[in-house]
Image (spheres, helix red, strand yellow):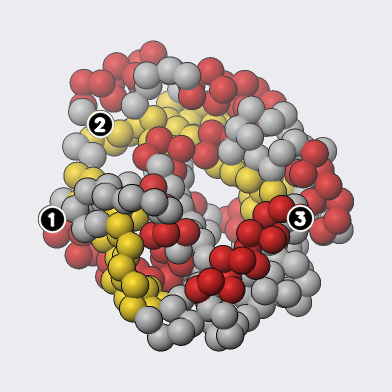
Amino acid sequence: MSEIEAQLAENHQVLPFDPPYFGKHATLGGMVASGLSGPQRPWSGAVRDMVLGCRVINGSGEILRFGGEVMKNVAGYDISRLMSGALGTLGLLLDISLKVQPKPAFERTLILPASTAESLIKFNQWRASLLPLSAAVHYDGAIYLRLSGNPAAVEQACSQLGGAAAEDAICWTAIREHKHAFFDQEAPLWRLSVPPATPCLELAGSTFIDWAGAQRWLCSDVPATRIREAVGRVGGHATLFRGGDRLGEIFHPPSQGVWQLHQRIKKAFDPNGIFNPGRLYPAL
Ligand SMILES: Cc1cc2nc3c(=O)[nH]c(=O)nc-3n(C[C@H](O)[C@H](O)[C@H](O)COP(=O)(O)OP(=O)(O)OC[C@H]3O[C@@H](n4cnc5c(N)ncnc54)[C@H](O)[C@@H]3O)c2cc1C
């Protein structure tokens, strides 16, 4: 458990976006700057949705405050959200106000056998339902569901869904922290972000489907250009998360318009290119 998580647990609170920490010394700044969310993200929102405000030092040495501290309080551009996922390229986060949630009263995990194609159809149906889902993944011929909320609602949903109890079969923290056996592979690890109803992508390698279809982890030796083409065709993007050519493009190359926006924002916050040059894109 990370230090951040342990402090929240003392007050029976959790970060609703379920972030990975990748080590117990992870910092709040690194967590927000990396912009990563865990299995609960489709139901609770992403990191940026929970950032209420922040204080930042920019490349000109100015200390700037954006947003509020206790509620959403933004007039004009919502700059605190821009900091989420910027990987520290726009400035140094000095303090951050985040929304937290009470720890769910009750949780159950179910396993239901399903092929990849079947799982995507089911995820699509369940997304539109009122089921108290808080995680839905597919791996190795089975769907794993986490249900969270009040005991009566969770138990009722479990009997409606069928399947078997799987508390011991899968560990949600291991998925979030990439300690699950799937992540223990040699091939480069890709994070594919796609519209959730996207059918199976025809890419060689092994896949772990998270976020009820919207986030797909792919371990594959297929060349980067082919992966990016396939994901781009369905309106998604592909990030080379681990391994592969770390000197090339890690993030999906942006369109011309988005690239110009990136450059203008970088110039406004960090005119001399001090903060993490090349961290987001080699040319930024
Ligand atoms: C594409 C991608 C690939 C990743 N691959 C891995 C991986 O292979 N292994 C792994 O363990 N983790 C990986 N991560 C996760 C991430 O880098 C962090 O390790 C983690 O989420 C946060 O840990 P940390 O607090 O130690 O942050 P750090 O690792 O210290 O920092 C993470 C990023 O946040 C920035 N940052 C940190 N603090 C601040 C601050 N106060 N203000 C502004 N910016 C700040 C850093 O400059 C850096 O770019 C990856 C993230 C992304 C987006």
Q: Residue at x 72, y 29 (%)?
A: 199
Q: Nearer the viewer, mark 1 or mark 3?
A: 3
Query: x, y percentage for residue 198?
Result: 69, 31
Tell me whether the residue at label 2 lies in contact with that at label 1, contact meaning CB atoms closer than 8 angstroms: no
Quarter of the rendering occupied by the C terminus: bottom right
The residues tagged by marks 1 and 3 sit, at their Cα atoms, a distance apart of 46 Å
Query: x, y percentage for residue 77?
Result: 43, 53
Q: Residue at x 68, y 54 (%)?
A: 258
Q: Residues within 10 Å of mark 3 (few under 14, many from 20)?
A: few
Judging by the rendered image, the residue that carries numbered circle 3 is 256
Q: Nearer the viewer, residue 255 or 107?
A: 255
Q: Earlier in the sequence, mark 3 or mark 2?
A: 2
Q: Earlier in the sequence, mark 2 or mark 1?
A: 1
Query: Is the residue 69 above or below the residue 137 in the image?
Result: below
Q: Which mark is residue 149?
A: 2
Query: x, y percentage for residue 276?
Result: 57, 80
The residues tagged by marks 3 and 2 sit, at their Cα atoms, a distance apart of 44 Å
